[in-house]
Image: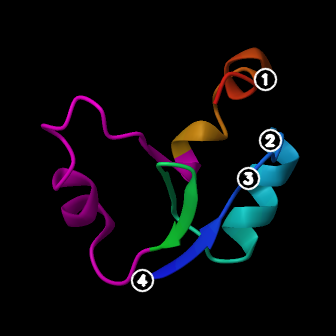
Amino acid sequence: MIVNNMEDIQIDRKKIEQWISEGYDVIQDGKLLKVDGNLQEFLAQFADEEESKTYLLQELITWPEEELKKL
């Protein structure tokens, strides 16, 4: 798994497209992650955690810009 910290970055669709093209899969607790192996299995680990902030980039790209600004 490769991690890239994100601090004070404004998230928008263009930025998400860039991250996807760079091979990132997930934002988790403010960090970009490249997931090795099965992405669904990785995400399932956090399904029961109420406070975990894990977002799939392919899903985020469909969100309205107003919602992305809240992340």
Viewer-side residue, 39 vs 10: 10
* SS class, disc 2: helix
Viewer-side label of 1, 3 = 3
Disc 3 target residue = 7
Residue at figure coordinates x 78%, y 23% from the top left: 65
Looking at the figure, which quarter contains the C terminus?
top right
Residue 12 sits in quarter:
top right
Separation of marks 4 and 2 at Cα, in angstroms: 23 Å
Residue depicted at 18% across the width and 52% down the height: 44
Q: Reading the chain from its start, which is encountered first: label 4 or label 2?
A: 4
Residue lying furthest front: 7
Q: Is residue 51 left or right of residue 11?
A: left
Q: Give the secondary structure at mark 1.
A: helix
Boundaries of the magenta span: 35-58
Badge 3, how many Cα within 10 Å: few under 14, some, many 20+?
Answer: few
Quadrant of the rendering where the N terminus is positioned:
bottom left
* 58 on left or right of 49: right
- Tell me the tag on residue 1: 4
Going by the numbered disc 3, the residue's amino acid type is Glu
Q: Of the residues shown, which amino acid type is indicated by label 4? A: Met
Residue 3 - label: none
Residue 9 shown left or right of residue 28 in the figure: right
Q: Picture coordinates of residue 24 (x, y %)?
A: 59, 70
Circle 1 residue = 65
